[in-house]
Amino acid sequence: MHAKVAVIDQRWSTVGSSNIDPFSLLLAREANIVVDDQPFAHELRSNLQRDMESGATIVAKTAWRHQPWSEAGLDLGQLQFCAAADGLDRICR
């Protein structure tokens, strides 16, 4: 399974398929579950830490600067499309 996972403030967690981009958040059929439970967050964080130590690839925060223009353009296009779709949705309500 390919999932996005996060533990925030050592208290709540989210697991699901959503990316943190406008397309995933506004238009794609994605799903996440949010769990507000400190023991669950602790166990999930421990599992993530173990997995990262056993062979995860580290991606620098600035890696996006080195992506090809075609990918950067696609990201910008998605953002503009979602902004336009959101505007149309607001008008139609």
Image (cartoon, rainbow, N blue to C red):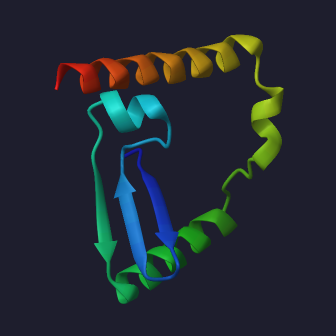
* Residue shown at 69% from the left, 10% from the top: 70
- Above or below, 92 against 37 in this view is above
Residue 91, position in %: x, y? 25, 20
Residue toward you, 21 or 49: 21
Residue 63, position in %: x, y? 79, 38
**Quarter-of-image position of residue 92:** top left
* Residue shown at 38% from the left, 38% from the top: 25
Residue toward you, 90 or 77: 90
Residue toward you, 39 or 78: 78
- Above or below, 87 against 46 in this view is above
- Above or below, 19 against 39 in this view is above
Q: Residue furthest top?
A: 70
* Residue shown at 32% from the left, 78% from the top: 36
Q: Residue furthest bottom?
A: 39
Total numbered labels placed on residues in the image: 0
**Quarter-of-image position of residue 15:** bottom left
Left or right position of 57 against 47: right
Residue 18, position in %: x, y? 39, 43
**Quarter-of-image position of residue 39:** bottom left
Residue toward you, 53 or 8: 8
Residue 46, position in %: x, y? 53, 79
Left or right position of 81 against 59: left
**Quadrant location of the C terminus?**
top left
